[in-house]
Image (cartoon, rainbow, N blue to C red):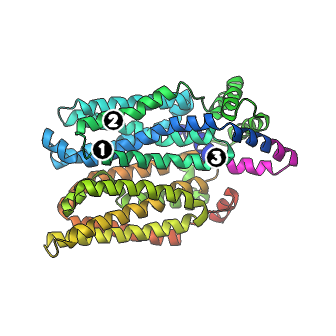
Amino acid sequence: MAFGDDEERGEGIIQQDIQQPLIQAKRTTTDGGRNQNQNGENGSRRHPWMVYLSTFVAVCGSYEFGACAGYSSPTQSAITAELGLSTAQYALFGSILTVGAMIGAITSGPIADFIGRKGAMRVYSAFCVGGWLAIYFAKGSLALDIGRLAGGYGMGAFSYVVPVYIAEIAPVHLRGALTTLNQVMICAGVSVAFIIGIVLPWRALALTGLIPCVILLLGLFFIPESPRWLAKKGARKEFEAALQKLRGSDADINHEAAEIQNYIEELEQLPKASMFDLFQTRYLRSVTIAVGLMVFQQFGGINGICFYVSNIFEMAGFSPSVGTVIYALLQVVITTMGATLIDKAGRKPLLLVSAVGLVIGCILTAIAFYFKAHELSEKAAPILAITGILVYISAFSVGMGAVPWVVMSEIFPINVKGVAGSLATLVNWFGAWAISYTFNFLMEWSSSGTFIIYAVINAAAIIFVVMVVPETKGRSLEQIQADINA
């Protein structure tokens, strides 16, 4: 429904994922250009504090994303007991978050392009604040669902605007490292919600979700708007002032400012793409790779496990509080490790290692529930369950969590990247909804069977990665696209 505006949204995604290689290519054309760029980088290296502050403020939105996603796991028993919710009602409460996120992800691009990155983050924070307050004051399932839907909208919108804003403000030598903080903070938000949810009542846990929103709203008064968005809007003075503030008062921004202006002029000359263009023969393999990775990422079970991990441990006979704490800490550590490996090990090896680990984790968990259901080994079942879940989340965090988004950003030509990103994001959030909604029903049907299904899907992901997904590490975007379309 918002796909008509995706060419504008694509500008943000393009700048995040493709601008650096294009600019790097331009920098190699003349020695003078390289020298000017080096001077600019040196200046930014001496004055990174505003970039760091701006990134910190922005990733509060990423933390909010994680807090929303992690809320339903430690609160399931308390909410259902206090409000008398059925399995179906709580399944709707858990999964409606992803419905809001789908809407937020689709509409976030046009909104961020219309009112700016800072203005958009204010709007999304307001949705999250309203959502948490609705949950806090809820007396029944309706208020819970409304609050969860509002929080999901803000979460989905943050998933777009935060990495775009960071990529648009960061200098070249910091862009990769700072952008990875988005995923790290999402995991941190999930993990903290898991841990403090063990000791806090569910209403109090909802109030803790307001903290990152407050920090974000206050911080936006002290950080600059995205220079690239200002340049796109033709606000030349504001654009230069914002760039100067980010790079430092004594930094030479002339070369970088000229590159940004030239890039935006080139972008505006490209033909507009529609959703139907993606199904042309020349784009079909790229669409297959991107959508396929998103399908396997979500239908491998991650959101069902993440949303209800505490209940999984309880059903398996393992302490939910101990298991949740270990899960939460491990997730942050492995995600951080994966961010450092992606440019060293390569995309395809990480995906393969990740998918194999997911299969192993699912099989171990399935065996644990099979033992418990048939009373074969009461001592072995909890150990197998915690081992399986920890193997699963470790495997997901190291590869399948972040790598599909990286590959997606690399395989599409610049003129269709925006609309292609919208399609892949929509598929991703639909998968998240489907898995989170059906998880409790599947577990009631057969707990071991649920994880066998996920194991089969993850095994299919191994075949897909081997047969379809190319390695993109260390290659220019033009080389990648030429090989895909050959």
Mark toward the start of the polypeptide (3 vs 1)? 3
Amino acid type shown at disc 1: Ile
Q: Which of the 4 image quarters holds residue 486?
A: bottom right
Residue under the image location 48 percent in, 49 percent down: 183
- Say what secondary structure mark 2 lies in: helix
Amino acid type shown at disc 2: Thr
Between label 3 and label 1, give the one nearer the viewer: 1
User: Measured from the top left, where is residue 117 in percent x and y?
Assistant: 55, 32
Q: Which span of residues is magenta-colored?
A: 18-36
User: Measured from the top left, where is residue 307 in percent x and y?
Assistant: 30, 51
Front residue of 186 and 290 = 186
Task: Measure the C-alpha gap from mark 2 to mark 3.
Answer: 31 Å
Amino acid type shown at disc 3: Leu
Q: Which mark is residue 435?
A: none
Q: How many numbered discs sit on the rendered protein?
A: 3
Residue 291 in sight in this render? yes
Q: Which mark is residue 174?
A: 3
Front residue of 366 and 317 = 317
- Say what secondary structure mark 3 lies in: helix
The residue beneath circle 1 is 196
Mark toward the start of the polypeptide (1 vs 2)? 1
The residue beneath circle 2 is 208
Q: Disc 1, disc 2: CB below 8 Å? A: yes
